[in-house]
Amino acid sequence: IVLTQSPGTLSLSPGDRATLSCRASESVSTAYVAWYQQKPGQAPRLLIFGASYRATGIPDRFSGSGSGTQFTLTISRLEPEDFAVYYCQQYGSSPPWTFGQGTKVEIK
Amino acid sequence: EVHLVESGGGLIQPGGSLRLSCAGSGFNVSRDFMNWVRQAPGKGLEWVSLVSYLGTTYYADSVKGRFTISRDNSKNMVYLQMDSLRAEDTAVYYCARGRFRGYFDSWGQGTLVTVSS
């Protein structure tokens, strides 16, 4: 399954709402989609699994939604520490698991 | 607390071999799906390999036949044996714990593998 993220770069200001899209080339079974945040020089951090479930310790300004082939990560109000690269990942019926190419959220 | 630490990266010539290690603490690697994920310089994430709690292994097509994942339950370690290395294998390699088969809730800090002559 190929995942395509859009946009490639999102230029926003602190306090803005961010909407990141992830489109799958075929339906992802049971919405097995996760979202990760990665900052420079750091390992990725799990934000969302099962399309809409927040991982432990993740603030509620992060939310995920979607099903089938279209999934969305929303950050309701950007904090300074949210400027980073975000990846979606599918873990459907069987490996190989695949990631999207990433969306960079940068300060406008 | 779950903790993963990778080691074994370095500079290796094309065609050479390298073995990466991942030390787990705070949980049992034998009871989870353990993965390797890599990231080439300036690029995105690429899943590489998985060993399930049953010992079943899976590989990305790009490494199939060249890489072998294994684990030592007595040492709580996971390994990635990489043979016939190519320049395109140059990347930071992360060890990651997989939950419910496929999402990664814990990651190591990564180890850099550079394949170059």
Image (cartoon, rainbow, N blue to C red):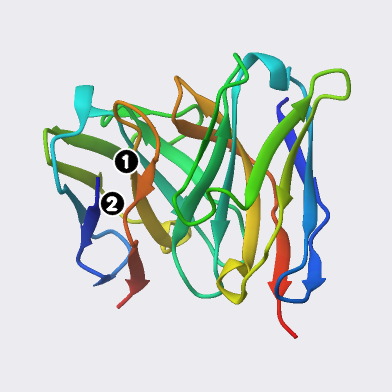
Left or right, A98 with reference to A17: right
What residue is shown at x 51% (from left), y 31% (from top)?
A57
Three-letter amino acid code of the residue under disc 1: Arg
The reply to whether dot 1 and dot 2 touch (C-beta < 8 Å) is yes
Residue B76 visible in the shown view: yes
Determine the CA span between mark 1 and mark 2: 6 Å
Residue furthest bottom as drawn: B117
Quarter location, residue A71: top left
Left or right, A74 with reference to A87: left
> Vertically, is A63 above or below A84?
above
Residue B111, horizontal then vertical, whole percent: 73, 58
**Residue at mark 1:** A61
Numbered label attached to residue A28: none
Residue A65, horizontal then vertical, whole percent: 18, 35
Considering the image in quadrants, where does the N terminus of chain B appear?
top right
Residue B115, horizontal then vertical, whole percent: 70, 74
Considering the image in quadrants, where does the C terminus of chain B appear?
bottom right
**Residue at mark 2:** A77
Three-letter amino acid code of the residue under disc 2: Arg
Q: Residues within 10 Å of mark 2 (few under 14, many from 20)?
A: some
- The residue closer to the viewer here, A16 or B35, is B35
